Amino acid sequence: MNNLVNDLLELSRLETEESEAPLDSPVDMPALIRRLGRDAVLADAEAHPLDIDIESERSLHGVENELYSALSNLVINAFRYSEPGRPVSVRWHDADDGGLVFEVQDQGVGIDRRHLPFITQRFYRIDSSHSRAQGGTGLGLAIVKHVLKRHGARLDVESEPGSGSVFRCLFPASRACEAPQRRRGAM
């Protein structure tokens, strides 16, 4: 219940754009993604192998905690909707148009094409019995959508039932920046 309340509050804040956090702070995305990977592996009781491929050292102007929330939702969903032991891949790379792409690929249950237009709506469930068994609040992808919108980005999804899904966060070139100076010893 606590997770539901927290997700509702976060989503409400994002939908009304009441966040006072400026969108111009440089966020060290390679470091954020490495931290997200460590946190996800620690939280993953099903022990899905997680492959993280950081192909770009470029970063984004944005709000770090919002970006972490959105991207971690995608990784958690990949774990949640994949059989134990199935690998999940995370990739951060440059887009052909100068933007940046965060990509999560799983080999999970997949999503039928007819559901794709609705998956970012609040509480939308493809299979309510499976969703309840897996946990979650039904708000994760709605939060992802609103964080991306606030950052001028969009979500692209490819999925095939029984084969898995690829979720891509496409950030525009206008958000890209060089990574802020990393502290000594930081990963």
Image (cartoon, rainbow, N blue to C red):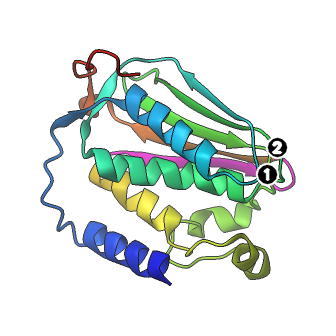
- Secondary structure under tag 1 reads loop
Q: Magenta stretch containing residue 77, yes or no?
A: no
Kindly check if marks 2 and 1 are in contact, taking CB atoms under 8 A apart as contact: yes
Looking at this view, name the residue that lies furthest to the right. Answer: 162
Callout 2: 10 Å neighbours few (<14), some, many (20+)?
some
| Residue at screen point 38% across, 37% down | 171
Give x and y (percent) for residue 3: 47, 75
In the image, taking residue 44 as reference, residue 123 lies left or right, namely left
Q: Is residue 161 found left or right of 142 in the rendered image?
A: right
Query: Residue placed at 77% from the left, 38% from the top?
Result: 87
Amino acid type of disc 1? Gly
Q: Quadrant of residue 170?
A: top left
Residue sitting farthest toward the front: 185
For the residues marked 2 and 1, what is the alpha-carbon distance in whole angstroms? 8 Å
Relative to 153, say whether 149 is above or below: below
Q: Which quarter of the picture shows residue 5? A: bottom left
Residue linked to disc 2: 86
Q: Which residues are magenta?
A: 152-163
Q: Position of residue 11 (x, y in %)?
A: 36, 71
Mark seen at residue 108? 1
Identify the residue at horizontal 79%, vertical 51% (top origin).
108
Is residue 132 depicted above or below 173 in this figure?
below
Query: Which amino acid does the dot numbered 2 rest on?
Result: Arg
